[in-house]
Amino acid sequence: MSGAAGIDRHMADSVELTGLRVFAFHGVFEEEREAGQEFVIDVKLSLDLGPAASSDDVAQTIHYGELAEAIAAAVQRDPVNLIETVAQRIVDLVLAFPLVMLVTVTVHKPSAPIAVPFDDVSVTLTRGRN
């Protein structure tokens, strides 16, 4: 259904998980692969939360505890060079949940080997169902 702004009202429903911290061994440089570092993950899922709100049934939504564990496991496995690849891995995992219509994933690498002072570096992917 369209809302006042012509937007599907269900696309405004969301579940967000922010600041998920996962220690992993991704990076272009050998020292990153050997020592590892903390990655911080933010995920926003768009889905219809109406059925869950009406039924008060966790099966009608995304169980965020299980989601957090699945994302952490995905980030920890198979080291890769780029956080872009890690973000895509998380996108693919989240879109495997049939209720999810759209997902935005941000992977932060606050300890990236950058020679100048910085607060954070991150990549963000937004993907929906085809």
Image: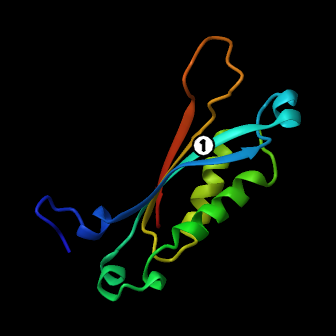
- Mark 1, residue position: 40
Q: Secondary structure at mark 1?
A: strand
- Residue drawn at (82%, 28%) of the image: 29
- The picture quadrant where one finds residue 23 is top right
Residue 78, x across and y down, in percent: 81, 52
Above-or-below relation of 45 to 30: below
- Residue drawn at (68%, 27%) of the image: 112
- The picture quadrant where one finds residue 113 is top right
Residue 86, x across and y down, in percent: 67, 48
State how many labels appear: 1
Residue nearest the observer in this picture, 63 or 115? 63
Q: Is residue 108 left or right of residue 30?
A: left
- Residue drawn at (36%, 84%) of the image: 56
Colouring mode (rainbow / by chain / secondary structure / one colour): rainbow
Amino acid marked by disc 1: Val
Above-or-below relation of 55 to 49: below
Residue 76, x across and y down, in percent: 76, 52
Q: Is residue 55 left or right of residue 130?
A: left
Q: Residues within 10 Å of mark 1 (few under 14, many from 20)?
A: some
Q: Is residue 125 left or right of residue 83?
A: left
Residue 50, x across and y down, in percent: 30, 79
Q: Quadrant of the N terminus?
A: bottom left
Above-or-below relation of 26 to 121: below
Taking the view exactly as shown, the residue that stands out farthest to the left is 4
Taking the view exactly as shown, the residue that stands out farthest to the top is 116
Q: Is residue 83 left or right of residue 17?
A: right
